[in-house]
Amino acid sequence: MATQPYQRLSDRTRARGIRVAGFAIILLGAGAALLPAEKGISSDVLGAMLVGAGLIEIVAGSLRTQVRELAMAAGGVTVLAGLLFIINPETQFFPTVWPIVGWLVLRSVILGYASTHSRGSVRTWMGLSAGMDLLLGIVMIAGLSIAAVVVSIFGPTPQLIASFSWVLAASFVVNGLMLLEVASCEREAAIAS
């Protein structure tokens, strides 16, 4: 009988891999927040960030023992959204937000469903990640600018904060924190066994 790829790795190795993926996605989130919005953001840059985050998420998902396929599917949706921006450079954020809204909503549905098949703190963090993506999608659908939300919370801020890059940053950071929690649970399971 063939073993699953994640069964060939030790629990500690899988936990380390997921932890590295979590930190990598958080770093991508920080990079997204620092994009120079006042100069315009290239669709290639947005696409590359989405593809990178999606590939990292696919690898992290492949290391998971629970909801493995769903975690990988969420990463796949992110890769597809990124490829849309790279392949079709006319799809700039400001004239067309629908590809990103679709990505956020679809990813939210996948993670929300996956959270129903998870336990404990992983379930909570998957729900938070799904909720963040859904909230960002709703804000964009409603036509509210992310600037209005940020200014209402933090007060007047530079144009950088008001850009679409903050949507990516928020989604990436919460997703990275979720992966860090998954890694922690995987590590605890390794110690217990």
Image (spheres, grey):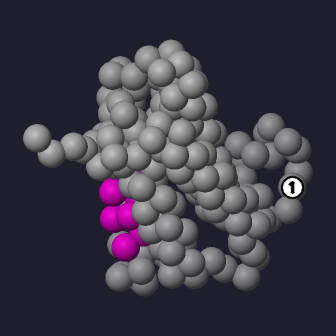
Looking at the rendered structure, the secondary structure element under dot 1 is: loop
Answer left or right for 45 relative to 148: left
Give the extent of the magenta segment: 75-83
Crowding near the residue tagged with mark 1, few <14, some 14–19, many ≥20 C-alpha atoms within 10 Å: few
Q: Is residue 9 magenta?
A: no
Vertically, is 156 above or below 138? below
The quarter of the picture where the N terminus appears is top left
Q: Residue furthest right?
A: 156
Residue found at x 61% / y 39%: 180
Q: Position of residue 22 (x, y in %)?
A: 60, 48
Q: Quadrant of residue 32?
A: bottom right
Q: Give the residue pinned by disc 1.
A: 157
Q: Position of residue 62 (x, y in %)?
A: 36, 48
Amino acid at dot 1: Thr
Q: Quadrant of residue 27?
A: bottom right
Q: Position of residue 66 (x, y in %)?
A: 35, 30
Vertically, is 41 above or below 165? below
- Return the residue nearer the eye: 2 or 102: 2
Residue found at x 54% / y 39%: 12
Main SS, magenta region, reads helix
Q: Is residue 78 magenta?
A: yes
Is residue 5 at all visible to an observer of this figure? yes
Is residue 73 at all visible to an observer of this figure? no
Answer left or right for 144 relative to 71: right
Q: Position of residue 74 (x, y in %)?
A: 37, 48
